[in-house]
Image (cartoon, rainbow, N blue to C red):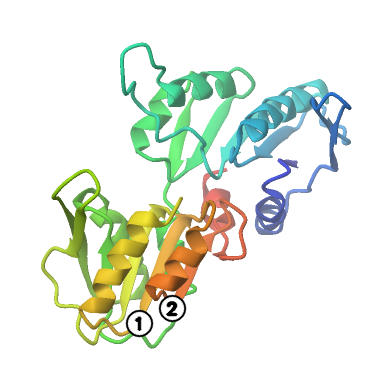
Amino acid sequence: MIVSGSASQALASALAAETGLPLAPTRYDRFPDGEALVTVEAELAGERAVVVAATVSDAAHVELLQLQDAAREAGADEVVTVLPYMGYARQDEAFATGQPVSARAVARAVSSGTDRVLVVNPHTDSACDFFDVPAEPIDAAPRLAEPLPADLTDPLFLAPDENAVALATAVRDAHGGGDTDYFEKTRHSAEDVEVAPSDADVGGRDVVVVDDIVATGSTMSRAISVLDERDAARVFVSCVHPVLAGSARTKLATAGVEAVYGTDTVERPESTVSVAPVIAERL
């Protein structure tokens, strides 16, 4: 049975349809003092509970721990936790003396209530090593090819940096053609950062900028402005996790983006494709 976090209801529903597993009725409440309370209104005795919950906020982390515990209380023999989006995954090292490795801290907390974890495109696959139970990454990048227009002109798939070229290549291969490249960043000062494609000529070409996550959109919008200056035809943004915090969406629109495509790991209006099929394959 699938147990959904409040931030992942569309994905949980899609996963239920994909797998044929039933959705557990779940209620999300708050006490007057602000504390959360979840209720799994299903009998899970002898069953496997698949808890699907994107940890998009501190509150979502607490809710996930409660959902795992509620599944056990309902009698589940096994709990599998699916993290469509793993919050704190980018804090995978201590940045200064006395600071935590936050990804490790939250992974240990999640491990306490589950038997297995699936993480969709964590910041790095090594984040899965922080869990105390078996944990594995799922690559949803090829799903980003589905919503792209079929009539892309001489497409170029651009990664945000050299380390993410594999992400852009996965989308390119799933789409069926085109070149890949990456942005190079030249820092002239703390505030002055030049961003440009490393090699490829973008003139007259449709460009798809591929990233695992778009958060504030600041770096992405600067990069897109460069593409516009170099006479790219249409520019699309494809990301696994469309966090799009604050004014990120308007920043991208102002920079000249034709469209933004994301998955339902973080449920936004831009979530035009579901990762349910790739999760279902690993359950």
What's under tag 2, amino acid-wise? Glu
Compared with residue 70, is residue 214 higher up or lower down, i.e. above or below? Answer: below
Quadrant location of the N terminus? Answer: top right
* Residue shown at the point (64%, 40%) measured from the top left: 53
The image quarter in which residue 277 lies: bottom right
Q: Position of residue 72 (x, y in %)?
A: 75, 22
Quarter where residue 264 is shown: bottom right
Residue type indicated by callout 1: Arg
Establish if 122 lies above or below 161: above
The number of numbered badges drawn on the structure is: 2
Question: Which residue is found at the position 18% from the left and 58% from the top?
Answer: 194
Q: Are marks 1 and 2 in contact (CB under 8 Å)?
A: yes
The label on residue 42 is none
Crowding at mark 1 (Cα within 10 Å: few <14, some 14-19, many 20+): some
Earlier along the polypeptide chain: callout 1 or callout 2?
A: 1
Q: Secondary structure at mark 2?
A: loop
Provide the residue designation for mark 2: 258
The label shown at residue 234 is 1
Taking 116 as reference, is 139 left or right?
left
Residue 12 appears left or right of 88: right
Can residue 98 be seen in the rendering of this structure?
yes
Q: Quadrant of residue 17?
A: bottom right
Q: Which quarter of the rendered picture does the C terminus lie within?
A: top right
**Residue density around tag 2, few if under 14, some if 14–19, many if 20 or more, within 10 Å:** few
